[in-house]
């Protein structure tokens, strides 16, 4: 079983970039998906107009480290809680770094953070900042080699 | 086999497998991740899954980019769900050779079955591991199989040896082509024709379908597998496909359709498989579809079912399974041997240092290579007297043609 032991390089960061709800503005999601790819991440892109349950399904099945939700519709305070609940239901929440991008008014941000959103990236955030944040905060799994 | 540092608490694997068999989606997802990452202990994991595998019908779907594979897989998954089957999907996408990263977009097309957890879709990146991809895919299919999926669809671009290797591990291989693209015909010529059990002419509402069907028919005949019935209408039942059987050897010379006598032949020998009578060889089916509209999907499912019954009745399924296991064993042994060789290379100072000596004119690559393999060869020879090996025709026969992985 020697091929079993540790010759592998470290696991790439696996992300789901998701467009949830009814807004059709996916330019930002595309740009992020591509930047993440160029950073060496594995990016699963959901496509447009996904319901929270679909996002949860994809996040669980794809076993992602990072879930990035792009919302520009203003419906974040109803959509994000549903995603969080869904992830909790499958026991996936604690091992998923949840980040939100898009237009989120300042006064809503604390609520989202309390729900468990690790970071919120508004318009104009330098790409490198987002990438660095993901690199530093992508959850370590108990079964990851040290 | 040596185990340098016994890495993983087997407890963890035992739990994961128990949860997976219990139907926990997250456990299945995590098992696939560990398999895909070749994480320490992943082999133990796959070994534990093995006793629970073998029940799923594994269907490989391949074809050139843009032929409609993802849409087809989506619609197929929906069709299988409609009749109560649970479905697993493994979708392989290329990785960037520069960053190693990838954007896996196959999920975008999964629209018909979203929200249905009984369709488990997993995207995989072709992370540029040499040869490792087909191992990871096969093992992921095992995981879905063990989880209890009735049907597992494996989707991959039909370019490159890796991809061909992947779909070859399926029970049934579907090759998807679209009209109006000369590329498809080129692809078929380039060796993918031989692996197709079912050919899907997708986008059949576009111009050029007739021509593509004619070309396909011609190529299938030329390949000598007998008269492949071309189901040009796309709405005929399986009976059309089942007709036109000729004996396995007569195919090349027999004219295209002799439905009357060919049919009689085929039926007769095919009807009593239990007694071990000859079952006619499989003639690749051609099915036309418009995946976006869902047209022809039922025909395609019929064709897959027909192929599955053929595999069962003829014993070809067993044969395929055996060669699949053989390939798997060979691959694993090579992986292990490579690890041993790498260790030996390191022990002798590393590849760079060895190359430097060749560069300096001290030695040549052949001598260096022999020096590395010799200790291993010695061990093998010690363990098994060479005379015994030479006496055994099976052993010697197996050594020969296995050059390719």
Image (spheres, coloured by chain):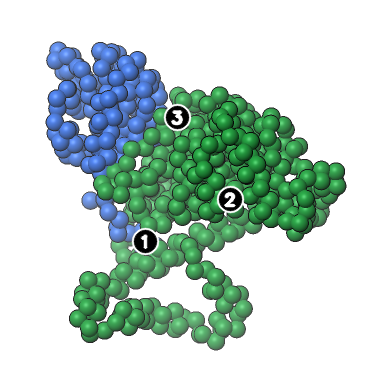
Q: Quadrant of residue B260?
A: top right
Residue A114 in percent (x, y) is at 19, 20
Q: What colour is chain B?
A: green
Mark 3 crowdedness (10 Å alpha carbons): few <14, some 14-19, many ≥20: many
Q: Is residue B335 above or below residue A85?
A: below
**Quarter of the rendering occupied by the N terminus of chain B:** bottom left
Q: Residue at x 49, y 54 (%)?
A: B165
Is there any visible trace of residue B289 in the rendered image? yes
Q: Front-most of B67 and B157? A: B67
Pointer 3 and pointer 2 on the same chain:
yes
- Chain assignment, label 3: B
- Chain assignment, label 1: A
Pointer 2 residue: B193
Pointer 3 residue: B109
The blue one among the chains is: A
Pointer 1 residue: A3
Residue B318 in percent (x, y) is at 65, 54
Q: Residue at x 59, y 53 (%)?
A: B194
- Give the secondary structure at mark 2: helix
Q: CA distance from mark 3 to mark 2?
A: 26 Å
Q: CA distance from mark 1 to mark 2?
A: 34 Å
Determine whether label 1 and label 2 are within 8 Å by CB.
Answer: no
């Amino acid at each position: 079983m020697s091929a079993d032991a540790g010759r592998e390089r470290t696991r790439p960061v696996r992300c789901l970039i998701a467009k949830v709800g009814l807004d059709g503005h996916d330019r930002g999601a595309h740009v992020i998906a591509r930047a993440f790819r160029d950073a060496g991440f594995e990016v699963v892109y959901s496509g447009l107009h996904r319901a929270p349950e679909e996002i949860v399904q994809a996040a669980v099945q794809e076993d992602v480290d990072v879930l990035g939700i792009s919302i520009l519709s203003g419906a974040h305070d109803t959509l994000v809680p549903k995603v969080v609940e869904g992830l909790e239901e499958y026991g996936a929440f604690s091992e998923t770094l949840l980040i939100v991008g898009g237009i989120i008014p300042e006064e809503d941000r604390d609520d989202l953070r309390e729900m468990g959103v690790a970071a919120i990236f508004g318009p104009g955030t330098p790409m490198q900042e987002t990438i660095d944040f993901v690199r530093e905060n992508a959850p370590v799994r108990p079964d990851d080699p040290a | 086999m040596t185990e340098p540092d016994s890495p993983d608490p087997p407890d963890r694997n035992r739990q994961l497998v128990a949860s997976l068999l219990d139907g926990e989606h997250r456990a299945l997802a995590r098992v696939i991740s560990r398999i895909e990452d070749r994480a320490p202990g992943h082999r133990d994991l796959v070994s534990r899954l093995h006793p629970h595998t073998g029940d799923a019908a594994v269907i490989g779907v391949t074809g050139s980019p843009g032929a409609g594979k993802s849409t087809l897989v989506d619609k197929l998954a929906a069709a299988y769900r409609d009749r109560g089957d649970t479905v697993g999907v493994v979708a392989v996408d290329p990785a960037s050779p520069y960053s190693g990263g990838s954007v896996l977009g196959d999920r975008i097309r999964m629209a018909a079955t979203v929200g249905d957890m009984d369709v488990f879709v997993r995207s995989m990146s072709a992370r540029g591991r040499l040869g490792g991809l087909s191992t990871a895919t096969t093992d992921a299919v095992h995981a879905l199989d063990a989880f209890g999926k009735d049907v597992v669809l494996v989707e991959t671009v039909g370019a490159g040896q890796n991809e061909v290797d992947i779909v070859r591990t399926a029970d049934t291989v579907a090759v998807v082509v679209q009209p109006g693209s000369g590329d498809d015909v080129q692809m078929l010529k380039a060796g993918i024709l031989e692996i197709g059990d079912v050919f899907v002419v997708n986008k059949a509402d576009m111009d050029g379908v007739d021509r593509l069907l004619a070309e396909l028919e011609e190529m299938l005949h030329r390949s000598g597998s007998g008269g492949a019935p071309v189901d040009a209408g796309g709405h005929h039942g399986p009976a059309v496909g089942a007709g036109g059987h000729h004996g396995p050897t007569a195919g090349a010379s027999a004219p295209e359709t002799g439905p009357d006598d060919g049919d009689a032949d085929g039926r007769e020998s095919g009807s009593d498989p239990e007694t071990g009578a000859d079952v006619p060889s499989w003639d690749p089916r051609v099915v036309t579809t418009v995946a976006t509209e869902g047209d022809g999907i039922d025909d395609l499912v019929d064709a897959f079912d027909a192929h599955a019954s053929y595999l069962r009745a003829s014993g070809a399924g067993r044969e395929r399974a055996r060669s699949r296991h053989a390939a798997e064993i060979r691959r694993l042994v090579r992986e292990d041997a490579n690890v041993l060789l790498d260790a030996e290379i390191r022990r002798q100072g590393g590849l760079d240092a060895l190359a430097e000596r060749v560069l300096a004119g001290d030695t040549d690559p052949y001598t260096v290579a022999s020096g590395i393999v010799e200790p291993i060869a010695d061990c093998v020879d010690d363990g098994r007297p060479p005379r015994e090996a030479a006496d055994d025709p099976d052993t010697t026969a197996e050594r020969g043609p296995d050059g390719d992985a």
